[in-house]
Amino acid sequence: MKRTAQSREPQVKAGKAAAKGAAVVKQPPVKLPAVKLTDEQFQAISHAVSDPRRFAILQQVAAPSGVACGDLREHEVISPATISHHLKELTEAGVLEVERDGRCANLSLRRDVWQAYIERLAGL
Amino acid sequence: MKRTAQSREPQVKAGKAAAKGAAVVKQPPVKLPAVKLTDEQFQAISHAVSDPRRFAILQQVAAPSGVACGDLREHEVISPATISHHLKELTEAGVLEVERDGRCANLSLRRDVWQAYIERLAGL
DNA sequence: CATCTAGTTCGATGTCTGTCGAACTATTCG
DNA sequence: CGAATAGTTCGACAGACATCGAACTAGATG
């Protein structure tokens, strides 16, 4: 798979996408069971979302129906191996859920965990 | 200034402090003027808070009256040079404000910026 | 005014991290 | 069943980053 020159910063395209953010359908006021984060998990989430590419992935995956791995915009700018690396970081941090569908993977945001993370940050 | 062996992870002491979190006085419902974060600033904040030591610093600094640099618990575990390095990261990200008081520095949380950061994350 | 204190900057060091191609596993297709 | 597709893992590489001691600047003290 060909792509443009190696770059640490996301390509302008991805950057702009991250900046604008996908249109988000507002969640109905469903009360999620409270999740309690360990310190390690909190730290892992902070680390996982500090990378602009991983945050951009989370933005896409936050859509109510999730997103198929193959539909991630990152396929246009980084290699499948790197995408896999980032997905692993997010999954191990606990904010991403992967559901295999044949040879495809469907990705979704662990909203309960994300909510707990936000609340932890807001506690400052 | 003496301290224990070099370690990337914060010492248990600092870790526990970060885990428990300082007791936070609930802010009165004062409406802060909305701050708009640029993508770069959002990214810089994410990066700045992803480090456990910097997050622990923010927790201390979030006290309503802020905290004097010399009173940061980090002085027990890392060198002044490293503290300075972390303070610079937080200041440049825009979440920390430094006010010199003679040779001392008083640190406080930019609550407006922090609030904007939380809201940006919650937008997923 | 010399000395001390508080914090900053510089340069070095070792570790971490995002990237890749190649090889791999698992599933689907023709 | 062989070929194609989707995604993963491995090992290597180059750059980023947290750490330090030493030297520095600026303010306070005796």
Image (cartoon, coloured by chain):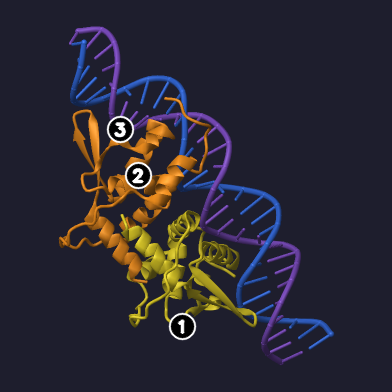
Chain colours: A yellow, B orange, C purple, D blue
Q: CB atoms at circles 3 and 2 under 8 Å apart?
A: no
As measured in the structure, the alpha-carbon distance from the residue carrying label 3 to the one carrying label 2 is 12 Å
Query: Earlier along the polypeptide chain: callout 3 or callout 2?
Result: 2
Question: Numbered disc 3: what chain?
Answer: B
For label 1, the crowd category at 10 Å Cα-Cα, with few meaning under 14, some 14 to 19 and many 20 or more, is few
Which of A68 and A90 lies nearest the eye of the viewer? A90
Q: Which residue is mark 3?
A: B70
Question: Residue flagged by tag 3: what amino acid is it?
Answer: Gly
Q: Is residue B1 visible?
A: yes
Q: Which residue is mark 2?
A: B57
Instruction: Answer yes or no: are tags 2 and 1 on the same subunit.
Output: no
Element type where label 3 sits in the image? helix
Q: Nearer the viewer, mark 1 or mark 3?
A: 3
Which residue shows up at 31% across the image and 62% down it? B118
For label 2, the crowd category at 10 Å Cα-Cα, with few meaning under 14, some 14 to 19 and many 20 or more, is many
For label 3, the crowd category at 10 Å Cα-Cα, with few meaning under 14, some 14 to 19 and many 20 or more, is few
Above or below, B28 against D30 in this view is below
As measured in the structure, the alpha-carbon distance from the residue carrying label 2 to the one carrying label 1 is 38 Å
Question: Residue flagged by tag 2: what amino acid is it?
Answer: Ile
Q: Which residue is mark 1?
A: A65
Q: CB atoms at circles 1 and 3 under 8 Å apart?
A: no
Element type where label 2 sits in the image? helix
Question: Residue flagged by tag 1: what amino acid is it?
Answer: Ser
Which of B108 and A33 lies nearest the eye of the viewer? A33
Question: Numbered disc 1: what chain?
Answer: A
Residue A71 image position (x, y, % from top left): 51, 78
